[in-house]
Image: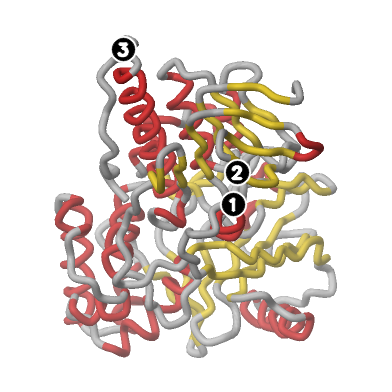
């Protein structure tokens, strides 16, 4: 790249939000430069090959229900393999499959062990509402926490705390379920309406697919931005990229360093352990949720997507809330042996992923989407400006692109240049 170049728009960060924004701007005919500090795209959504295994950066699943996913992603090319519905709840009195009794045989007796008929009726009622009600109704709900939302739905404290809360802690990385109840209902809707899957080449295949759609020369890897200037951005070694529009599409910490006036965003960390085993400890294709121990959940991911492990081996992913210490990891492995009822002597711990910004927190009072335009020529997007989801990241990037196009269209009209109708920055059709 020349020492100084000029383009219509610079996008900083090639995660999902930055890729969506850059694609939309390019589709509109703008000259765009997408700058990524890493050697690859994806942000937190990356996958690492290691000794024949495929390790996602922390346990992740891909939900096919999101509107932005259906709009942007070639699902067939991902060669998806699906999780079986429901989850297995591990308790002191045994493991129970928690699922939809109308679609899964044998689920109802186990559910009746966990809760009363009244609890199951309340669960069915709010699930039907979330699946069938207009999205606007869910988004416009009361500003309560997810824990309060369960109570308002008519569930007993015992059923909420002992059955749903262990699973939801792993979804939101929130021990007390203080996350927005509106967001909880939207996520619950997406799980009911969609299918949770794993791509053949890992979740990192999704952002790579978006990157492959960019015109040649738009994406610049290993190009960290040192600071924003009055007319663009400054890169390492004094290189400059001039542009009337700069979109910061990084994670919340990096965004705060480039945009000092951006309000700080609390984040939730997670630790994910990966173990290789000579054989799967069980044959299920569901999450094993730790109802009473230190783990969030565990999963034999190679049962779901065989491409994650070499033939004749198994890959087990296990997640713990927060940044786990060596002592906590040791306790987690002892818990794993108890949950799977096996010895870990033949297992090999092949990776420990500490993900400090796994999810942005979304408290009950927070808006489900924030404006992307901060000042003339300055924009920000990412799941920390919307909801902590693939949909949230993609939708935020799309809104940022619309804001840029609207503003640059206004500039062109002032300069008496022809401009097409520029869409306004509007909310997503989902999350």
Q: Nearer the viewer, mark 3 or mark 2?
A: 3
Residue drawn at (67%, 75%) of the image: 323
Looking at the image, which is closer to me, 225 or 322? 225
Mark 1 and 3 residues: CB-CB less than 8 Å, in contact? no
Mark 3 and 2 residues: CB-CB less than 8 Å, in contact? no
- Compared to residue 161, the image places residue 208 above or below, namely above
Q: Which of disc 3 and disc 1 is earlier in sequence?
A: 1
Q: Which of disc 2 and disc 1 is earlier in sequence?
A: 2
- C-alpha separation, residue under disc 3 versus residue under disc 2: 29 Å
User: Callout 3: helix, strand or loop?
Assistant: loop
Residue drawn at (62%, 37%) of the image: 233
Label 2 crowd bin: few (<14), some (14–19), many (20+), radius 10 Å: some
- Compared to residue 254, the image places residue 335 above or below, namely below
Q: Which of disc 2 and disc 3 is earlier in sequence?
A: 2
Residue drawn at (47%, 75%) of the image: 174
User: Callout 2: helix, strand or loop?
Assistant: strand
- Compared to residue 158, the image places residue 400 above or below, namely above
Give how far across and how far down residue 12 sits, in percent.
59, 40
Mark 1 and 2 residues: CB-CB less than 8 Å, in contact? yes
Residue that carries the numbered disc 1 in the rendered image: 258
Looking at the image, which is closer to me, 252 or 429? 252
- C-alpha separation, residue under disc 1 versus residue under disc 2: 7 Å
Horizontally, is 278 left or right of 117 in the view? right
- C-alpha separation, residue under disc 1 versus residue under disc 3: 33 Å
User: Callout 1: helix, strand or loop?
Assistant: helix
Residue that carries the numbered disc 2 in the rendered image: 228
Residue that carries the numbered disc 3 in the rendered image: 416
**Number of marks:** 3
Horizontally, is 313 left or right of 391 in the view? right
Give how far across and how far down residue 391 sits, in percent.
40, 46
Label 3 crowd bin: few (<14), some (14–19), many (20+), radius 10 Å: few
């Amino acid at each position: 790249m020349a020492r100084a170049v000029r383009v219509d728009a610079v996008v900083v960060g090639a995660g999902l939000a930055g890729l969506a924004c850059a694609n939309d701007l390019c589709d509109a005919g703008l000259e765009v430069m997408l700058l990524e500090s890493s050697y690859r795209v994806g942000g937190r959504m990356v996958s690492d090959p290691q000794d024949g295994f495929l390790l996602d950066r922390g346990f992740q699943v891909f939900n096919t229900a999101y509107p932005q996913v259906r709009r942007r992603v070639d699902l067939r090319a991902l060669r998806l393999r699906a999780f079986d519905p429901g989850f297995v709840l591990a308790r002191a009195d045994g493991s129970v499959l928690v699922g939809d009794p109308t679609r899964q045989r044998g689920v109802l007796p186990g559910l009746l062990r966990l809760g009363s008929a009244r609890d199951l009726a309340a669960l069915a009622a709010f699930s039907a509402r979330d699946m069938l009600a207009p999205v606007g109704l869910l988004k416009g709900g009361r500003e309560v926490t997810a824990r309060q939302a369960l109570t308002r739905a008519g569930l007993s404290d015992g059923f909420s705390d002992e059955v749903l809360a262990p699973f939801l802690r792993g979804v939101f990385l929130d021990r007390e379920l203080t996350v927005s109840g509106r967001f909880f209902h939207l996520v619950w809707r997406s799980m009911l309406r969609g299918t949770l899957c794993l791509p053949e080449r890992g979740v990192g295949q999704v952002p790579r697919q978006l990157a492959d759609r960019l015109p040649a020369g738009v994406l610049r890897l290993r190009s960290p931005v040192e600071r924003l200037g009055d007319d663009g951005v400054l890169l390492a070694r004094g290189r400059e990229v001039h542009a009337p529009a700069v979109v910061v599409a990084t994670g919340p910490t990096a965004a705060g360093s480039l945009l000092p006036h951006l309000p700080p965003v609390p984040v939730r960390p997670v630790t994910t352990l990966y173990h290789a085993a000579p054989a799967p400890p069980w044959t299920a294709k569901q999450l094993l949720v730790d109802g009473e121990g230190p783990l969030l959940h565990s999963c034999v991911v190679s049962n779901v997507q065989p491409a994650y492990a070499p033939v004749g081996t198994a890959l087990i992913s296990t997640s713990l809330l927060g940044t786990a210490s060596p002592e906590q990891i040791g306790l987690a492995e002892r818990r794993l042996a108890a949950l799977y009822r096996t010895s870990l002597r033949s297992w090999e711990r092949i990776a420990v992923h500490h993900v400090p910004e796994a999810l942005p927190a979304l408290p009950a009072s927070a808006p489900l989407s924030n404006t992307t335009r901060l000042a003339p020529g300055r924009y920000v997007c990412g799941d920390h400006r919307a909801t902590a989801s693939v949909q949230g990241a993609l939708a935020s990037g799309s809104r940022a692109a619309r804001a840029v196009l609207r503003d640059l269209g206004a500039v062109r009209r002032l300069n008496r240049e022809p401009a097409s109708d520029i869409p306004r920055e509007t909310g997503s059709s989902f999350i």
